[in-house]
Every structure is written in structure tokens, then in C-alpha cells.
Amino acid sequence: MKEKITIIKVGGKIVEESGSLDNLLDRFAAIGGNKVLIHGGGRTATAMAAKLGIESRMVNGRRITDEDMLQVVTMVYGGLVNKNIVAQLQARGVNALGLTGADCNIITAHKRPAGEVDYGFAGDVDHADGKMLAGLIAQGLVPVIAPLTHDGRGNMLNTNADTMAAETAKALAEHYDVTLTYCFELPGVMRDPERPESLITSITRESYKTLLADGTVGGGMIPKIENAFSAIENGVKEVIITSADAIDGIQGTHIVA
Amino acid sequence: MKEKITIIKVGGKIVEESGSLDNLLDRFAAIGGNKVLIHGGGRTATAMAAKLGIESRMVNGRRITDEDMLQVVTMVYGGLVNKNIVAQLQARGVNALGLTGADCNIITAHKRPAGEVDYGFAGDVDHADGKMLAGLIAQGLVPVIAPLTHDGRGNMLNTNADTMAAETAKALAEHYDVTLTYCFELPGVMRDPERPESLITSITRESYKTLLADGTVGGGMIPKIENAFSAIENGVKEVIITSADAIDGIQGTHIVA
């Protein structure tokens, strides 16, 4: 019997406003057993870049990461956001360890080849080291992972946090029964964000096709759900999309293999 | 018989110029056995603060760390400088793990009480967890430590890198035969920086008094040597002050208990 592990991915406004971050960290600290937190930080990076006179350019919701922007995301994701979360988890008695993909070589990637769009120093994940992560977790440590990887040749790479979460979950599935929770501002995937009762409680590959076709799912939700399917189809036991108030994992949208 | 460990502290210009950093990391990668790297980053923090319109104020060579400056040092030391070093060590086959004092709770501190000077969010170290560090090192990991601690109540604290090195060395002395090398721009403590033959090859508490009295040692060298004595008098086997070109530890100024 494998032990259980809970992987929570938080992004968007949640980690970037102190009230909602406090709430999230209280709930995360209360989760029993093994756990991992994966965070974003795009709004903070955009704000910091603006202060430094660096323009943020996004294509299809993804950031163009030139050399200056790579410096910004390395310091904002790996330093400011990550260490703030680590210190605040320590204050809650959680023995957090902040990591990027470069630390302990846990997640390697390659620079995305320039196609129609050149995303610059954006990393597509090659390998996540579940054994190394499991070793750290077995010591009672709680990894807090920033959305950065490295190419093994000395370069950090900016990497989508939803993808980091899916890859981490898949790598840990060999060692644990993994529950992966994508946590954002809404209670889950909604037919109408204004109506709580329109929450879609589960999505299969079949129903996903319909949701795409009728426009219920679009924009940034598409890569999130693709990552969720990638996880559930590769050994992860349970994948849920829900709000920060529901990371105990009962409510929300379950992604079903 | 304890295993040996080499702890290298690098600061100043060395980690902040790519040529000298490359040289240092080549030499560090070549050190056999257990090792730890502790780095500074003050010049990068000052430059980043200036770009953000934040003035750097120093008293007695130490930075006044208000709330804005704490954000800058957290992102520069913990993110930009630390992850750059980690990625470049990974490229050299060293399984580096970037840490601040908050990560794994390795170094706790308290905010320095305001005296004649209020240094703001500056941390005076309370405890370094040698057992936790030794556990990570035993897994083949190489800690790369940024000059940041935390207070256990959710706040990061800016902490002198020489002090971080001494405290880390003392904490590891229970588990290893520790050599601590402070590495900077000069070959060691010099009577005349212009004349290589004026290198002082060893300093005792007795000779230190004379060097202070005759003005050979002054300014930023005083806290460095005080930290070195604190290490050698608390279980560290060997403490050397030398240049980045000599981290194999034969040349330089040996601090003798």
C-alpha cells in the first residue's frame, strides 16, 4: 500500500494577496500527511517588471520570457513569492523547503523551440525526479515549488505552474497515491461563473469535447484541463479543480480518466 | 572518524561578475567530497534597489533593511543570485540545493533590536540546524545558502553572509571535520594589498590585537575575522581567509585558535 500525498497548485490572485494567501496557507497547513505546494506568481512578476521598466508580453496567455524577463521571474518566483510562502508555512509549523527545478535537479526542461511564437526562455519539461522528491518528503519536508525549471546547461527556464504541478504529480505517482488539486478563484469549472449551482462536478475526455465545442471551456482553462488529463491518465489517483476554500478536495470539478 | 566537509563563503564581486563566478564555480565543482557554498550578493541588491528607486543605506558596512529593501534582498539573494549559482553548479554536475534559513528551518534568527542604529529587518542568528543540513548532505546534495534567515513568525530577515558561514560551520562541526574558507578578492589578510609578499599567513587572538592596534585590520575585515574566530573557537577544524583562486585551502591567512 502506497502512502497518500496531496499536491496543491495555487496560482493567480490567491498567492499574491496577503488575505487570500493567509487563508490558503492555514488550510494547507491543516492537511495531514505528505504534501507539496506548487505556486504561480505571474501578477507579481508583471508588476515587478513594470517597476523595472520591462514590458510584459503575453501570447495565448503565456509570457514571452526574454533575458531581462528571465531575471525578473527567477527573482520573483524563486525568491520573493517562494520564500515568503516558505517563511509563512514555517510559522505554521510546516517544514517547508522552497525549490525550483534546478534545486536537487528535480525538474529539467528544454527551451521551447521558436515556432510561430518565440517564447524565449520558456521551458518544456523533460523530466521530474520523483525519487529525489520522495526522499525529501520522507524526511518530513514539504516541497514548495516555484514555476521555474533549468536546462542542465546553466540556464533557468520559465515554466507554466499548471504543467509543473502535473509533472510533479506524475513523477510522485510511482511512490504515492497522489491527489492533485488545482486551486483557483472559482469553485471549479462552471457553466456560468455567476451561478454556483452551475459547477460541473466531473469532466471526462468525452464530456470535455462537448464543453470545448459549446464554449463552456476556453482560454486559460484549456491548458489547465489538458494538464489535469495528462496527470489522471498517467498514474495520478485523483485530480480536482476547485477553489482555495475547498482544498480538502471533496467539492470542485473532478477530472476523470 | 568524522568525514570532512569544505564550506566556502564567497562574496563581493566574485559572485556578481560572470567571469569570476565561472572561475569560482569551476574550482568549487572540483572540490571532492562533502561541501557547502554560502554566497553574498550585496552589489546586485544595491543595483536592483536603485533600479526600483529604493535607496540603499549602509551603516558600519551593514545594510539598513526596511520593508521595501527586505523584498529586494529576498528576491535578489534568494532568487536571482542563488538560483543562478544553483543552475550553473548543476551544469557542472554538482547536485546543488539552494537554501535560505527558512528552507527546512535551517537557520532561525531574531530581528536585531534597534539600538543607536535601527537596522530594520536584519537577523541575528539564534540557531543553525546542523543535523538537518547533514541529512541533506548525506543524500549527496550540496547546499548553496543565501544570506537570509527567518524569525519563525513568517518574516524573512537579511543576515550577514560571513555570519551565516560561521554559524553553518559551527553547526556542522558536530557531524564533520569542517574547513571553512572565506574567499574574497585578495590572497588573504595583507599588510599592504599592493604587495603579495605582505600576506599574513596566520592570525591568533594575540596577533589580532596587534593588527587591530596598528591599523592593519580595519573596516569590513573586522567582522569577518571575528566570525572566523567564532568558528575556530567552536569546533571548526580550520578557518582560512583567501582568494577565489586558492579555495583548495593551502595558501591564504589561517585563523588559529
Image: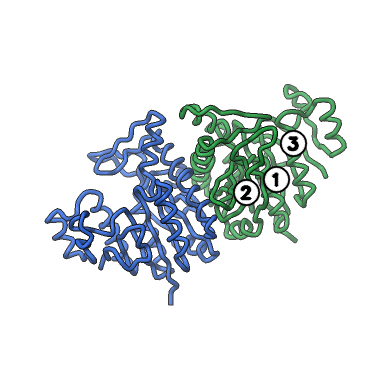
Chain colours: A blue, B green
The lab-note entry on whether marks 2 and 3 share a chain reads yes
* Residue B167 sits above or below residue A165 on the image: above
- Determine the residue positioned at 82% across, 30% down: B212
Q: Position of residue A95 (x, y in %)?
A: 54, 59
Do the residues at discs 2 and 1 belong to one chain?
yes
Task: Give the structural element (helix, strand or loop) at label 2.
Answer: strand
- What amino acid is found at the position of numbered circle 3 in the picture? Gly
Residue type at the position of mark 1: Ala
Secondary structure beneath dot 3 equals loop
- Residues B178 and A113: in front is B178
The chain containing the residue under callout 1 comes to B
Q: Mark 3 points at which residue?
A: B252
Q: How far apart are marks 2 and 3 (CA)?
A: 19 Å
The CA distance from mark 2 to mark 1 is 12 Å
Chain letter belonging to callout 2: B
| Quadrant where the image shows the N terminus of chain B | bottom right
Horizontal and vertical percent position of residue A223: 26, 53
Tag 3 subunit: B
Query: Which residue in the structure is indicated by mark 2?
Result: B36
Q: In which quarter of the image is residue A27?
A: bottom left
- Report the residue marked by disc 1: B166
Left or right: where A232 falls relative to A94: left
Residue nearer the viewer, A10 or B83: A10
Residue that sits furthest to the bottom in the current view: A1
Does residue B160 sit above or below A160 in this rendering? above
Name the residue nearer the viewer: B189 or A254.
Answer: A254
Residue A123 placement (x, y as % from top left): 36, 46
Question: Mark 2 against mark 3, which lies toward the viewer?
Answer: 2
Q: Distance between the residues labelled 3 and 1?
A: 18 Å
In which quadrant of the rendered image does the C terminus of chain B lie? top right
Q: CB of mark 2 within 8 Å of CB of mark 3?
A: no
The mark nearer the N terminus, 2 or 1, is 2
